[in-house]
Amino acid sequence: MEKQRLTVIKVGGKIVEEQETLNRLLDTFSTIQGKKVLVHGGGRSATRLATQLGIESRMIEGRRITDEAMLNVVTMVYGGLVNKNIVAKLQARGINALGLTGADCNVLHAHKRPVDKIDWGYVGDIDKADGNMLATLIDKDIVPIMAPLTHDGNGNLLNTNADTIAAETAKSLSPYYDVTLIYCFEHPGVMRNPDDSNSIISDINSSTYKELIADGTISGGMIPKIDNAFDALRNGVGKVIITKADAIDGVKGTRIAL
């Protein structure tokens, strides 16, 4: 029996935090055929609220150090303000959305990242995503909207990278659906020159990926994003595409292949 199509879309905080870009994204998301899941960020809003509350934001290579005070901030912003704003706007578009953190229905169980050279604080690394539970919701035509928060089973929420949540969610759903994972951000794909919109790299595989890292074309936060993409493909996800937020139909952008 042929599996139903399902699209997991991860959208960065910059897009969901501005009303104009958020509305455009949700208009497009609403038209995607088949089953779907949306995973979102919200880091700039968290930083802004932390500043207003007098809480210092500490980042290392684009990743947030999450002490107890910052955990409270990201919980409020990711699980509350950003998530519920998206859910309400999708309901207005006729999409029966349900906002979830990893603690809800135990869909994302994680452990606190061990202290090595850096103490990341309350940052979670995912142990298990419950694809069966998510599929139960999705089969009832509920659209999960997933915030970048997990839990450890001992009553603690954990701040968790949204790209990783998207990949783990996609992997967990691959036994049930034909899954496409789409990472969308402000560029139309992976670019050879960030200032030239015509310099999109249409396809990246494991060998060309090494070359692109070696020559500096791919660096910084794009590396863990593509690492997550390869991991998803090795674990049952059918397609992974990196593209712009207004092109989440999966036609344009950079396609990742093994």
Image (cartoon, rainbow, N blue to C red):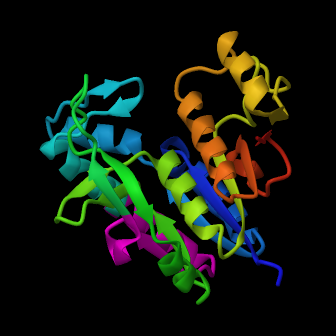
Q: Furthest residue to the top? A: 215
Residue shown at 61% from the left, 79% from the top: 95
Residue 39 appears at what percent x and percent y?
52, 58
Q: Is residue 45 left or right of residue 16?
A: left
Q: Is residue 2 above or below residue 159?
A: below
Q: Is residue 115 above or below residue 234?
A: above
Is 220 included in the stretch rendered in magenta? no
The residue nearer to you, when weighing 247 against 257, is: 257
**Which quarter shows the C terminus?**
top right
Residue shown at 19% from the left, 30% from the top: 56
Residue 152 appears at what percent x and percent y?
25, 60
The residue nearer to you, when weighing 125 against 74, is: 125
Q: Is residue 45 above or below residue 173?
A: above
**Which quarter shows the N terminus?**
bottom right
The residue nearer to you, when weighing 253 against 228, is: 228
| Number of marks in the rendered image | 0
The span picked out in magenta is 80-108
Residue shown at 57% from the left, 50% from the top: 11
- Residue 147 appears in the picture as rendered: no
Residue 160 appears at what percent x and percent y?
37, 48
Residue 195 falls in image quadrant: top right
Residue 6 falls in image quadrant: bottom right
Q: Furthest residue to the front? A: 234
Residue 17 appears at what percent x and percent y?
47, 48
Residue 211 falls in image quadrant: top right
- Residue 219 appears in the picture as rendered: yes
Q: Is residue 248 left or right of residue 172?
A: right
Is 102 included in the stretch rendered in magenta? yes
The residue nearer to you, when weighing 23 against 67, is: 67
